[in-house]
Image: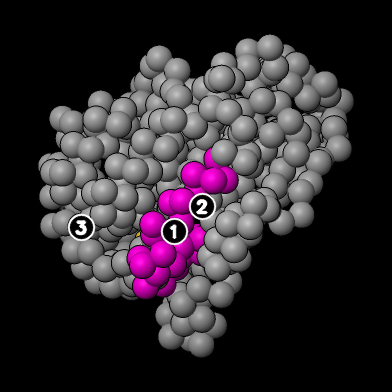
Amino acid sequence: MLIALRTDLPSWLWPRAAYIHVPFCAHKCGYCDFASVAGFDHLADRYLSALEREMGMTLGQPAVVDTIFVGGGTPTRLDPDQLERLMAKIAHWFPLTKGGEWTVEANPGTLDVAKVELLVQAGVNRVSLGAQSFRPALLAALERNHAPEEVERAVELVRGRFPRWSLDLIFGIPGSTLADCEADVAAALALGPSHLSCYGLVYEKGTNLWKQWQAGQVVPVDEETERAMYETVIDRLALSGLSMYEISNYARPGHESRHNLVYWANDAYFGVGLGAASYVDGVRSVNTRDLAAYLRRIEAGEPATGPTERLDAEARARETAMLMLRRTVLGIDRNDYELRTGYSLDGLLGPALARFVDQGLLEDDGQRLRFSREGRFLADRVLCELV
Ligand code: SF4
């Protein structure tokens, strides 16, 4: 039996999206705070069996979804047989609606013709490539283990085989200048992506990069330069037809990541695999990030989740406002917001929002609230205050 797309329940209660996590990487990058492991490829077959078991335990029966995102880690680190096995299991447990979006993350150097063909045959229609930078010194600062030429080779492989593909870039890398940032954006644009994710570097506690910063071995880019970099990214991409639609994401019209829009609408989603988060029927849960514990628990037929959390209605409404505001074009539509949360936006957050409008950080056309251009540079502060 198949669970059809549950159109009887709203998208914020019943998922139309699924995230599947594959944690294996060639090595651990210095800035990485994801649930990823290096040197554990020998556990990949066992992990795939656990994933399959977890999908069965979570769903009971296959559930139709509108978007699938296979992230990591590096999903394309799996060998062709393992990748084929994973794709088949995902297609079984999460059949995709007609016209649905199926994204797989890939790292340069891990794709070849056989893997690309296998993904196409499985029904994958979007690839997200982690380029991060095209400057060898900056890739070294991030402890990435690929060369710029490998990004170009990976793009050659995916271009023409997938209707949509995206590149990830990072700016604000220690040692980088505004000219480096301009050169990276130009190099990315030269490859012709229809979608770019472009993040300012974050020093996540516990990472190698964070330790180097704490020890005074690296100096973060100063705030003024980082702002100039962000401005360069926004303006240069807009000139090339890639409009900002979220504070770190840019796309040609119609090429936005539908899966990520689910998160920013605070809609429900399934999540399976190491460290994966789920949000189903108002309950949030996150799987353990410990690979051994994940395998042990799933193999024992137990869920791998940590404590679950059901937000009360007001907390969920505040969270929804914060997530929706990240969408720089859609922003928060007052009617949609009230329908989804049961709260009037102005009743719940009116004074705070009015203050940000007065400060020129938000724009209000009476129906929608969005970040102003200036507000995008101070988005973290605004979003923090709203929660
Ligand atoms: S490739 Fe990605 S997931 Fe893997 S270690 Fe590097 S940043 Fe983390």
Note whether 269 is above or below 213 in the view shown: above
Which is nearer the eye, 365 or 272? 272
Disc 1 vs disc 2: Cβ atoms closer than 8 Å?
yes
**Is 154 left or right of 38, judged from the image as shown?**
left
Which is nearer the eye, 92 or 151? 92
Amino acid on which the number 3 mark rests in the picture: Gly
Note whether 80 is above or below 326 in the view shown: below
Q: Residue at x 36, y 26 (%)?
A: 255
Query: How far apart are the two marked residues, 1 and 2, measured between alpha carbons?
Result: 6 Å
**Is 61 left or right of 115, judged from the image as shown?**
right
Amino acid on which the number 1 mark rests in the picture: Arg
Which element type, helix, strand or loop, lies under badge 2?
A: helix
Q: Is residue 40 magenta?
A: yes
**Is 307 left or right of 228, judged from the image as shown?**
right
Q: Residue at x 51, y 60 (%)?
A: 35
Q: Which residues are magenta?
A: 30-55
Which element type, helix, strand or loop, lies under badge 1?
A: helix
Q: Quadrant of residue 290?
A: bottom right
Place of residue 343 in the rendered image (x, y in percent of width and height, measured from the top left): 83, 24
Disc 3 vs disc 2: Cβ atoms closer than 8 Å?
no
Place of residue 176 in the rendered image (x, y in percent of width and height, measured from the top left): 32, 67
Screen quadrant of the N terminus: top right
Which element type, helix, strand or loop, lies under badge 3?
A: loop
- Give the residue number, with chain letter if any, for mark 2: 50
Q: Of the numbered discs in the image, which one, if any, rests on residue 109?
A: 3
